[in-house]
Image: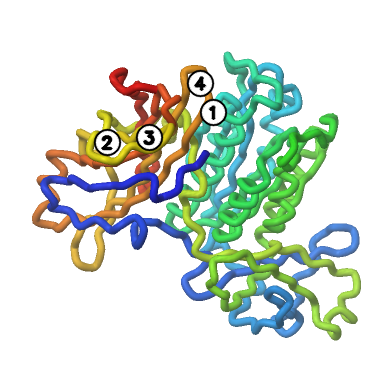
């Protein structure tokens, strides 16, 4: 059960109210917009054989519909300069866990097959490596880097076997949530590069996968709000997967590729480089069409077609593009309830120190079958990253989460929120010295025995987590 926002409250205690905190119901929720004024629709033109068509199309050759309604093209780029908007190309694998032969293990020992394709990247393009695991872990093994050889080495390291045996698919809920978290992390890191990069996520994965449909649609909405592309490559010997649980959609990488304008390739090892090279070529050859969005927070269906006159001139050309766009999508639709490690380029995990103390709230009216607690978070060291606003304030952005479990380890509750807060310049040194404290109230089931508290630095990506047993004095 995911508790509503009314199920928790936050009080910022930073150095005796030296900080101006934005209320989470108002400005505290961080959002990422597809564009400040325009939505960019990347269009890939291919001929009837699936090969890239010559770059001959002009703005007047396209027409765009938003939810079926014609919309004007506000900007057009027939080459989409990747000098100003380079790629952040991600290799993504599922960890080489036992009992999962159709995951990513067929790429083991064949990592160098992808290396020739990386030579077609442009000067400012970057390559990163990430993985997730069915035990709930997700991590970045290599942040976007200009070192192509380092990416191949990191990929080989990520594919090494781990001491973990995957449960049957029906019990892989932790892996589903780790995948969601990882996708958000990859988008965040891509957009943190300078100049800001276009996320291109290449899943080296057999796609024996599934996600609850509402959560998958949230993930797609998030991707559509960021202009990110999803591609997939699997070894041709991997069987297709169609089994799924009720309420789940199978083959999620296929679906996300379709929705974002990407593709899914099934190739033999001698064609791995060709598939990756095709992905890079598509990204370097896309047309960029800008339209004014309708900012209603809903997903809008996009249709991009050639005009009748252009179709007569280019009869074999087919267009591929993302299925829609969304605006004002909150980043906190995705969160991982378990252990998450973010690694720097040296492979060293970056973690924050987090302390949490919990006590029963005896001042509130009792709730049937539930118990209210007061939680005091503390980040004792000045580990949060910040930006400086126009007024000279130091601005922090933090995500808090609490995941509640019963004594059998079943997750009962899922509580999340974000806060942005400002520190005046004259108080910054004191905050750096004394750290950050946040007070929160949560309401959980009386069957709960353990709460896992997590805090994430939205700007730096660092994670802190701690498990706290519920006070034994409370009757369950």
Q: Earlier in the sequence, mark 1 or mark 4?
A: 1
Q: Earlier in the sequence, mark 4 or mark 3?
A: 4
Q: What distance separates the C-alpha of mark 4 from that of mark 3? A: 17 Å
Q: Is residue 355 visible?
A: no
Is the Cβ of the residue at disc 2 closer than 8 Å to that at disc 3? no
Name the mark nearer the viewer: 1 or 2.
Answer: 2
Q: Circle 4 sits on which residue?
A: 409
Q: What distance separates the C-alpha of mark 1 from that of mark 4? A: 13 Å
Q: Residues within 10 Å of mark 2 (few under 14, many from 20)?
A: some
Q: Quadrant of residue 433?
A: top left
Is 354 left or right of 319, judged from the image as shown? left
Q: Earlier in the sequence, mark 3 or mark 1?
A: 1
Above or below 361: residue 170? above
Residue 69 pos. (x, y %): 71, 80
Name the mark nearer the viewer: 1 or 4.
Answer: 4
Q: What distance separates the C-alpha of mark 2 from that of mark 3? A: 15 Å
Q: What distance separates the C-alpha of mark 1 from that of mark 2? A: 27 Å
Q: Circle 1 sits on which residue?
A: 136
Residue 317 pos. (x, y %): 85, 69
Q: Circle 2 sits on which residue?
A: 374
Quadrant into which the C terminus falls = top left
At a point 69% along the width and 36% down the height, the residue shown is 204
* Helix, strand or loop at mark 3: strand
Q: Which mark is residue 288?
A: none
Residue 350 pos. (x, y %): 37, 32
Is the Cβ of the residue at disc 4 closer than 8 Å to that at disc 2? no
Above or below 41: residue 11? above
Q: Circle 3 sits on which residue?
A: 454
Viewer-proximal residue among 231 and 426: 426
Above or below 470: residue 62? below
At a point 84% along the width and 31% down the height, the residue shown is 239
Is 355 left or right of 182, judged from the image as shown? left
């Amino acid at each position: 059960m995911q508790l509503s926002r009314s199920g928790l409250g936050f009080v910022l205690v930073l150095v005796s109210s030296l900080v101006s905190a934005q209320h989470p119901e108002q400005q505290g929720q961080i959002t990422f917009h597809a564009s400040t004024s325009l939505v960019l629709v990347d269009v890939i033109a291919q001929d009837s054989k699936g090969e890239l068509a010559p770059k001959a199309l002009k703005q007047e050759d396209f027409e765009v519909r938003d939810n079926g309604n014609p919309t004007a093209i506000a900007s057009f780029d027939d080459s989409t300069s990747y000098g100003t908007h380079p790629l952040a190309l991600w290799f993504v694998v599922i960890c080489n866990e036992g009992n999962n032969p159709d995951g990513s293990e067929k790429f083991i020992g064949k990592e160098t097959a992808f290396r020739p394709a990386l030579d077609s990247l442009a000067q400012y393009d970057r390559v990163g490596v990430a993985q997730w695991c069915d035990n709930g872990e997700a991590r970045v093994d290599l942040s976007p880097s200009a070192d192509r050889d380092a990416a191949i080495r990191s990929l080989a390291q990520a594919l090494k076997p781990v001491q973990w045996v995957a449960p049957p698919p029906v019990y892989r809920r932790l892996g589903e949530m780790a995948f969601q978290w990882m996708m958000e992390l990859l988008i965040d890191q891509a957009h943190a590069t300078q100049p800001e990069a276009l996320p291109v996520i290449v899943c080296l994965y057999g796609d024996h996968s599934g996600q609850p449909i509402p959560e998958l649609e949230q993930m797609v909405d998030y991707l559509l709000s960021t202009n990110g592309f999803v591609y997939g490559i699997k070894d041709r010997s991997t069987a297709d997967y169609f089994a799924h649980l009720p309420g789940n959609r199978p083959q999620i990488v296929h679906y996300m590729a379709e929705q974002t304008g990407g593709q899914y390739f099934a190739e033999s090892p001698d064609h791995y480089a060709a598939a990756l090279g095709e992905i890079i070529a598509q990204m370097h050859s896309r047309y960029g069409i800008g339209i004014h969005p309708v900012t209603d927070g809903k997903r809008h269906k996009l249709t991009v077609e050639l005009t009748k006159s252009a179709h007569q001139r280019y009869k074999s050309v087919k267009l591929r593009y993302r299925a829609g766009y969304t605006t004002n999508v909150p980043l906190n639709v995705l969160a991982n309830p378990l252990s998450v490690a973010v690694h720097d380029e040296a492979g060293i995990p970056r973690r924050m120190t987090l302390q949490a103390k919990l006590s029963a709230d005896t001042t509130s009216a009792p709730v049937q079958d539930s118990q209210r607690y007061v939680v005091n978070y503390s980040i004792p060291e000045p580990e949060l990253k910040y930006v400086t606003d126009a007024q000279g304030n130091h601005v922090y952005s933090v995500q808090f989460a609490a995941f509640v479990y019963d004594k059998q380890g079943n997750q009962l509750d899922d509580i999340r929120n974000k806060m942005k807060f400002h520190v005046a310049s004259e108080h910054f040194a004191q905050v750096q010295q004394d750290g950050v404290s946040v007070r929160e109230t949560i309401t959980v089931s009386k069957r709960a025995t353990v709460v896992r508290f997590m805090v994430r630095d939205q700007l730096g990506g660092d994670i802190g987590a701690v498990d706290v047993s519920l006070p034994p004095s409370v009757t369950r």
